[in-house]
Image: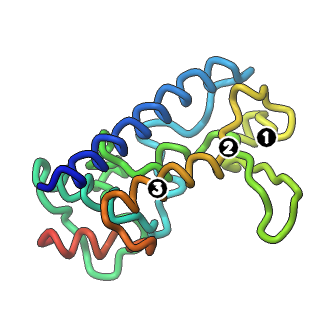
Amino acid sequence: MTERVAEALSRYRAIRDALDAFHVKAEAALPVALACRRGCSACCSREIHVFDVEAAAIRAALRDVGPPETSAGTTGCPMLDAAGGCRIYAERPLICRSHGLPVKFRQENTLSESRDICPLNEDVGIDPWTAPTAAVLNLEVLNAQLALVNRLYGGDGRRLPISEVVRATGG
């Protein structure tokens, strides 16, 4: 592993850890508990795409837990086990870590701010527009940090389907 790659992975882990810490603080600031939590796989029904630096972390996790057992015709995230749990929960990508939180971002080609949240969390009474500021994740900042670390890693900016990452590791 080159020094640059090691530095990129270290910075990626720092972003991941900061996001996890933000998640804890956000949950404490919200009036009710988030419905999204470990074991919830409601959003895992579609395939996600990850940057090269995230793919490297996933490949390392798969070396520890082994390739997923996938059935022909299955859809969604190949990291789910038969019970719907994430096999690489400790190394799940940033999109998975941020899902469920109230998020803010700019609409493409406009200056207007948008906010969003998982429908399961709307159902328990969390409104992304009235959520405490300390609980709202700025997706633009997170994505910019991730893009910079991915560039340091040597990624070209494209996102890979997670199923391709799995196939490349023998799954």
User: Sequence order check: which comes first, mark 2 or mark 1?
Assistant: 1
Residue drawn at point x = 20 percent, y = 59 percent: 59
**Would residue 145 be found to the left or right of residue 140 on screen?**
left
Q: Nearer the viewer, mark 2 or mark 3?
A: 3
Say which of marks 3 and 1 sits in front.
3
Precedes in sequence: disc 2 or disc 3: 2
Q: Which residue is drawn at 59% across and 21% down?
A: 25
The quarter of the image holding the N terminus is bottom left
> Residue 106: percent from the left, percent from the top?
78, 57
What kind of element bears circle 3?
helix
Q: Earlier in the sequence, mark 3 or mark 1?
A: 1
Amino acid of disc 1: Pro
Q: How many numbered marks appear?
A: 3
Q: Disc 1 designates what residue?
A: 128
- Callouts 2 and 1 close, C-beta under 8 Å: no
Residue linked to disc 2: 138
Alpha carbons under labels 3 and 1: distance apart: 27 Å
Left or right, 68 with reference to 19: left
| Marking on residue 148 | 3
Most extreme residue toward the bottom, as rendered? 73
Q: Which amino acid does label 3 sit on?
A: Leu
> Mark 2: few, some, or many residues within 10 Å (few <14, many ≥20)?
some
Callout 1 secondary element: loop
Residue drawn at x 31%, y 66% is 154
Q: How crowded is mark 1: few (under 14 residues within 10 Å), some or many (20 or more)?
A: many
Residue 56 x/y as whole percent: 25, 58
